[in-house]
Image (spheres, grey):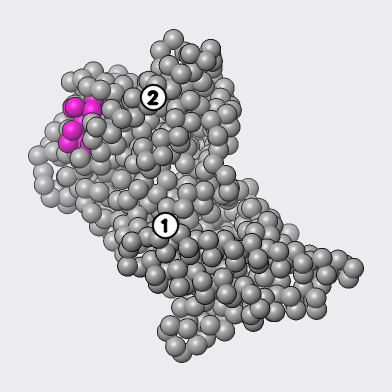
Amino acid sequence: MKIDDQPIPELPTRVMTGTPVSPGVALGIAYVHETGGLSVIEYCVPENRVAAEVARFRAAAKLVSDELRQISEEVKQRPDQAAEEISYILDAHAHMLRRSRLTRGVEAQITEKQINAEAAVKRQIDELVAAFAAMDDVYLAARADDVRDLGQRLVRRLGHEVANTFADLPRQTIILADELTPADTAQMDPQRVAGFATELGGVASHTAIMARSLGIPAVVGVAGLTKALSPGCTVIVDGSHGRVILNPTPEQMAEYRKGRAAALRRTRALNRLRSLPAITRDGREMTLMANIERPEETNAAVLAGAEGIGLFRSEFLYMNRDDIPGADEQFETLRAVIQRMDGYPVTFRTLDVGGDKLSRVFDLGIGPNPAMGLRAVRLSLARPELLRAQFAAAIRAAYTGPVRVLLPMIGSVRELRECRAHYDAVYQELRGQGVETPEMPPPLGVMIEVPGAALTADALARECDFLSIGTNDLTQYTLAIDRSDEQVASLYDGMHPAVLRLIHFTAEAGRRANVPVSVCGEVAGDPRFTGLLVGMGITELSMAPGSLPLVKDHIRHMRAEAADELALSVLRHADVIDIRRLVDTFNEVYA
Ligand code: PEP
Ligand code: MG
């Protein structure tokens, strides 16, 4: 029996609201994802293997304890004031792995319950965390985090951490969580995950972007969500209107079915545009490309009729794994994407970890302000072997089909020159080694996503081959609003005149230097912005594959001349309300 036809149990209905981040409606059964929880598989250990299992646990505990002591020694050498306190905590953790309630408890679980060491660690950690969390003393309650951290280290050492938390979910699952990281979202299979909702997160967070890319309806910033839910309840996630309904009534279910049918009809109608050009009524041609995070998404890009990959976020290749992908592996991945794109260009962006995108292969720590810290190209230049490996992969792949290489978070001409020096050197090295490369290095472009870069776009344009405007970060940094913080989500606005002026300035700089300028931030896939971007002289847009037909439809209905006029009058205004009014009027006429 399908979930739609199941009788609805008599449970209290709750309608909650949040920020809609990925359109569509989904109905499913709630799976509650606990952040920071351990994911392990539990299995029975035969009686004659119990002693060996205990020994396996002791060996892992010894390794973790040695590891912690070594880190503690290293920390002690650091001159900063916190060093002493940190090394004290690390020593205390190491001590907990000698004979303690934790280790005794794990060993008892293995012996008495005859379960594997990973599961025993999880059970014991869960018990201790609950006990600590229940304590009145704030200091002791905070020790729950220490215990959780130790558990994670132990499970990793035991080597049987479940690689993909969401791999075994049944079909039509709705994931509900306080927070989901981009790495979590990257593990979701749209065949199984019908939708998700979180308590934290903003509209331009990478988690939201991933949801749009995967076509999974999602709502973030739902206050009180985790307190209201129970696993296994029925949930509707309305990612178009920002609603989450727990235990829907029969009327709400009927409304959901109607909404889903209408959405399906719209998608079918839009899909007919697939092979038609993105051309305005008065003949201005636009190039519409797709953003992808994982190579598997290339299929969706092709099906949506994308004329290339305008942004391949390579950092996702570094997530949910314990080792750094080498040049050979990245070359193979890129080559497969190029082949699938069949002659259309693939824009490979070098590593952009940091901020809200983390990977456990880099121990970046949490700096005072991660979005402004050692992120993206700054990390690549601090560790040039990473950059060079990616350059080598892209240059080799360019021999098999059109590739462009894109540098994230460039802040100055200096940084671009430093990257260019590595780029040229890698190209020459490969040639010297007789590796197959194209006759010229592939085009090297710069993301314009830092206000400093936008304001020097003219200088950058003279020294690179193309510009790509990342409006997600450009908005965040221009307005000083964290793109993933739900508390300020209502202030995050790509139509702010400051952001629009920077986009316009960049487009003009590109035009004067005869360098193509594209937009690959989320506004590129938002049809409300299409007229404005066309009018500001942008000729290439790259977006989540699912947004492509809608944007194309918009372009095919509008006149470029009218879009030019719209941009001109918008740029004269400083109040976002006036700007929105002008844009809405334009869109009503041409929608
Ligand atoms: C952007 O900032 O607009 C962008 C496209 O890059 P990302 O979203 O990956 O930071
Ligand atoms: Mg960015």
Q: In what quadrant of the picture does the N terminus appear?
A: bottom right
Residue at the disc numbered 2 = 423
How would you rate the neighbour count of disc 2 (Cα within 10 Å): few for under 14, some for 14-19, many for 20 or more?
many
Image: 567 above or below 576: above
Query: Overall secondary structure of the magenta stretch?
Result: helix
On screen, 143 above or below 507? below
Residue 530 in the image, given as x and y percentages of width and height: 30, 36
Within the magenta stretch, is there residue 457?
yes
Q: Is residue 378 visible?
A: yes
Which secondary structure lies at badge 1?
loop
For marks 1 and 2, give the CA distance: 28 Å
The foreground one among 464 and 589 is 464
Say if disc 2 is inside 8 Å of ligand 2.
no
Under mark 2, the amino acid is Tyr
Q: Is 106 above or below relative to 304? A: below
Residue 200 lies, in percent from the top left, at: 41, 63
454 in relation to 92, above or below: above
**Left or right placement of residue 314 versus residue 48 in this view:** left
Question: Considering depth in this image, is 538 or 90 the residue closer to the camera?
Answer: 90
Q: Residue at x 31, y 45 (%)?
A: 473
Amino acid type at image mark 1: Gly
Q: Nearer the viewer, residue 202 or 25?
A: 202
Q: Which percent across, then down, holds residue 494? A: 26, 46
Residue 243 in view, yes or no: no
- Give the mark nearest the N terminus, 1 or 2: 1
Which of 516 and 325 lies nearest the eye of the viewer?
Answer: 325
Which residues are the magenta region?
453-461
Give residue 577's position: percent from left, percent from top: 17, 51
Tell whether position 89 is magenta. Answer: no
Which residue bears the numbered disc 1?
365
